[in-house]
Image (cartoon, rainbow, N blue to C red):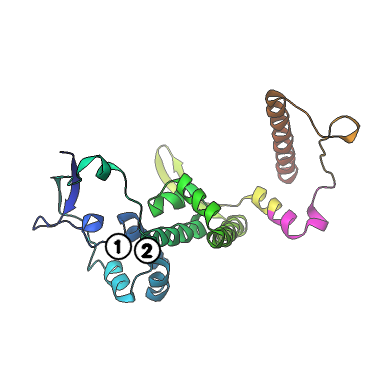
Amino acid sequence: MPVKTISVNERGQPVGEDHPNAKLNDAQVEHMRQLHEKGWSYGQLAKQFLSSKSTVCDICNYRTRGWPIAWRTVQDKRKGDKDMTPKKKSKKTEQGNKSTFLASLAHTCNVSKAAETAGVSRTCVYEWRKADPAFATEWEHARRVGAEALEDEAVRRAYEGVEEPIFFQGTQAGMVRRYSDTLLIFLLKGALPEKYAERHRTELTGAAGGPLKMTDDQMAMRIQQLIATVEARVEADESGKNS
């Protein structure tokens, strides 16, 4: 008979996501605590994870879903070939995973990381988006929120800078604040394109203005050429500011 490893408390009872009544997996619990540390209220978390505020409060304060004391191996009590087929998740569990994914996407703007936090695969979330128009709309909203968070961080690094340690002979000798001129250039071009945007554009067309026809190798080579052109312009901008 197949076996599996589960987490247990000091009495040997299943805990965490292995508990028979657990409604959240361990990744969702960890993400909830991270959001609480970032300032999310119990009410916001309860709505996001489809749980009661009392449950959220207990989890965030480690009164429940604490760290397991040990692990033990138990028999997997599935019977027959039919039971070996993964069971379809309930609607409530799926909705909880969707909520976790969206919250993480809004926080990271990274589909892979958000899917991992929700305990599902990238393929799964893309299938959800294809089959559920409402989820697709929420996905785009979460992505925009995440992109705005990335923009805020870019502004901070360009305007306020970040502190980096200075080492001398293997020992930290102090700190220096560094600013990103490249980020500042891109932010200015986005905020005031009429003033800072470059006055050129690249248009790819085929013969007589028709569709562009290239092999995969030719397309890859052209893309590399365009990337090299952009990098050269950024380097030229950097050199001009430092001269």
Left or right of residue 166, residue 151 in this image: right
Would you place residue 40 above or below residue 24 in this image?
below
Q: Which mark is residue 164?
A: none
Would you place residue 236 above or below residue 57 in this image?
above
Q: Is residue 241 visible?
A: yes
Do the CB atoms of the residues marked 2 and 1 lie less than 8 Å apart? yes
Magenta highlight on residue 11 = no
Instruction: Specify the quadrant of the image occupied by residue 242.
Output: top right
Callout 1, which amino acid? Lys
How far separated are the C-alphas under marks 2 and 1? 9 Å
Question: In front: 137, or 165?
Answer: 137
Instruction: Specify the quadrant of the image occupied by residue 69.
Output: bottom left
Left or right of residue 203, residue 135 in this image: left
Say few, some or many: other residues with alpha carbon within 10 Å of mark 2 (under 14 / 14 to 19 / 20 or more). few
Would you place residue 98 above or below residue 234 in this image?
below
Would you place residue 222 above or below residue 59 in this image?
above
Which of discs 2 and 1 lies nearer the camera? The answer is 2
Q: Position of residue 114 (x, y in %)?
A: 45, 53
The magenta segment: 187-199
Callout 2, which amino acid? Lys
Q: Regarding mark 1 in the picture, which secondary structure is present there?
A: loop
Q: Is residue 40 visible?
A: no
Residue annotated with mark 2? 92
Q: Which is the main secondary structure of the residues drawn in magenta?
A: helix
Q: Residue at x 75, y 43 (%)?
A: 240
Residue annotated with mark 1? 23
